[in-house]
Amino acid sequence: MKKILFLPFLQMRSGHHQVAEALMDIVKMQSNDVIVKKMDILSYANPALEKMITSSYLKWIRYAPETYDFAYKKLFYATSTNKQSFKWYYFFLLKKMEQLITEEQPDLIVCTHGFPSYLLSQLKRKRKCDVPVMNVYTDFFINSVWGRREIDYHFLPSKDLKAEFGKKYGISEQRMIVTGIPIHEEITKKTWSQNQSERTRILISGGNNGLGEIGNLLEESKASTQTDYYVLCGNNQKLYDEILSWNVDHIKPLPYLSSRAEMNQLYEDMDAIITKPGGVTVSEALQKGLPIFVQSVLPGQEEINLQYLTKKGLVFRLNDKKSFEQEIQSVLKDPIKMKEWEQSIQSYQAGIEIDGPMQIAELITGIVNQQALMPLRLDEQSDVYHLARA
C-alpha cells in the first residue's frame, strides 16, 4: 500500500484543510491501494502550543486587524522576507518534521500550507528528505513562506502565477500545472443564468467562523421587498441567534453545513453570493457560476486575493457608502456588466490545465505509483496533463 501525507497547518477549519480533504476524498475514490492521512505538524509537535496559537490568531484578526495586516505583509508577503524571521520555530519544527517523515514513511507529501512546505524544502536542501513533495496553493497568490525550488510539484491557482513562478524561480514547466484552487468534487459545475423570479436570492458567507460585518450589513435589508437572504453563520452562534431573533421571513440564518451535497444544492438555488475573498469559497462560487460580491475583507491574505480578483474582473467590490442591495440589483440587471463578468470567468477557466478533480486525483495517484519522479506532459489532443511514461 502507498501512503500520501497531507499537511495543512493548525487545527482550525480553513481553506488549507478544505483543499486537503477535497483531494483526499477524490484520491480515495480513485484508488483502493493508497492510504491518505492528514496531519498538522504543530499539533504533532506540541498540541498545547497549537491550541494557543490558533486561539491567538482568531483573536488577533478579530480585535486588531490592522496590526495583523502589517505583520502578515511584512513577514509573509514582502519579497525581501528574511527567512531568519522564522527562527523562533525553525529548529524545533524542522526536527519534528524529520521525525514525522521517519514515523509515517509516506510515498508522497502534499502541502496545502506554506509552513510545512518551507520546512520540507529545508530538509530537502539538507538532503534529509527524499520523499516527493507537492505544493497545492489555496490562495490566488503565493506568499514568501512556501518552499519553491526544492519542491517537486506545484499545483498553481492561475496561469499568471505559473508564468511568474517559472520565470522568477527557474522552475521547469514539467513541475508546474495550473489546477485552480482545488475544491471538492461534490461542488459540481454550473453556468450562471438570469433569475426569472421576482425575488433575488442572495447567499451571504462569512466563512466557517462567521467573520465579517454580516449583522450590520443586513440591518438595512430588514424591510426588503425584492431580495431573500440566506446567511451562512458557520460556528458563530451569536450571529445565528441575532438574525433568528429578528423574525424576518426573507432573512434566513443557516448553521454550519458539514454536508457538501447540501452546500452544492444551496449554491444551485442562489442568484449571487456575498463573501470574503477566501480562496476556496471564491473557487466554489466560480465553479457554480455565481456572481461574487465582496463587502468585508479580513486583513492579510484576503486583501491580496481581492487585488487579484478585482484586477481580473472575477468579483464585484461593494461600496460601503451605498445601499448594497441596490448595488447588487443594478449589477445583476446590467447585461453589459454581466457579459464582461462572464468573459472574465471564461478567461480564468481557460487557463486551467486540469479538467476537474478526477484528473487531479489521477495525477496524484500516478506520482505515488511511480518509483521515481516523473515529469508532467501535456497531451496536445486532449489539452490534459499526464505523467510522462518511459
Image (cartoon, helix red, strand yellow):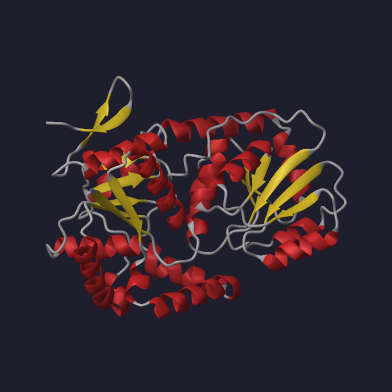
Residue 151 visible within the image = yes
Residue at image location 48% in from the left, 70% down from the top: 70
Q: How many marks?
A: 0
Q: Position of residue 282 (x, y in %)?
A: 54, 46
Q: Position of residue 61 (x, y in %)?
A: 55, 70
* Front position in the image: 269 or 315: 269
Residue at image location 43% in from the left, 44% down from the top: 182
- Asked where in the image residue 126 lies, by quadrant, the reply is bottom left
Residue 322 visible within the image = no
Give the vertical position of 347 relative to 324 (above or below): above
Residue at image location 26% in from the left, 45% down from the top: 167
Q: In the picture, which quadrant includes the C terminus?
A: top left
* Front position in the image: 128 or 317: 128
Residue at the top extreme of this rendering: 381
Give the vertical position of 5 relative to 181 (above or below): below
Is residue 93 toward the left or the right of residue 218 in the image?
left
Is residue 6 toward the left or the right of residue 340 in the image?
left
